[in-house]
Amino acid sequence: MPYFSFKSDGVNEVQLPNNTVNIEKYPFTFNETFAMNAIDSNELGKLSYYKQLGFGRVATTTLLNSYQLLLQGKDQAYKSIWTQILDKIVQRKEQAVAWHSQTELPKVGEPYSFVLRTGLEDFQVLNTEEKRIPLLQDANVSFKYSGTTYPKKAGWNTLEVEGDSTTQFSYYVYDADDWKSLSASNTRAANTKKFGKEIKENRTVMVNRPISLLLLYILFLLGIGWLWLSPKLSSQS
């Protein structure tokens, strides 16, 4: 808020240009002021801005809950949004540490495994709570290390080499409830795929309906009429 100015626009959802993806946003838009720069791209438009601050840049966006794109299986849209924002503000330099996540869907309280490659010696890796993580050095590749941590909170978590914040690595941790609806949806889809066709081909439907009193009365009259008329026809013949 100290660096950007906003005004209300009452819009809570937008469709990304050149994309069929809808995404939530705060009901505000930016007041364009001096030194504010839009992060222009085919997808973001003017939903994100950055500002020069000393030797670096600070950026923000009016997008809300963009992680829901991951829950909907729209990984590419999510990665595209944040890659465009970060590419605009992060300075490019040679990496001292290269990180690689081995856990596809990090969850609270569950093990999150990672690999890092570095030429550093005698270093320690800290997690979000600034606790040291034990590392296992690869016996065949001396600059390759692996480790496991147990994230305690949902949202963005970090790993970094102790004493060097420029090596920080961020990863998103999901709450257990985030995946309940997706899991239920996947279960229904799997059941439909497995049993849906078989049920349609071999389906027997039995419906219990009450008999119409009018129809019953008509059938009764026809029966009585035939019993009365039958002897008469027999005597004439």
Image (tube, helix red, strand yellow):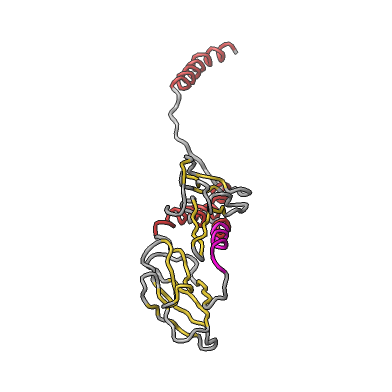
Q: Position of residue 56 (x, y in %)?
A: 51, 64
Rendered-image quadrant of the C terminus: top right
**Would residue 24 be visible to someone looking at this image?**
yes
Foreground pick, 2 / 39: 2
Name the residue: 47% across, 71% down. Answer: 168
Name the residue: 38% across, 78% down. Answer: 132
Magenta span dominant secondary structure = helix
- 83 part of magenta stretch: yes
Foreground pick, 32 / 22: 32
| Residue 95 quadrant | bottom right
On screen, 17 above or below 144? above
- 233 part of magenta stretch: no
Q: Position of residue 50 (x, y in %)?
A: 52, 56
Foreground pick, 162 / 50: 50
**Would residue 187 be visible to someone looking at this image?**
no
**In the rendered structure, which segment of residues is drawn in magenta?**
80-91
On screen, 179 above or below 222? below
Name the residue: 42% across, 77% down. Answer: 163
Q: Position of residue 152 (x, y in %)?
A: 36, 67
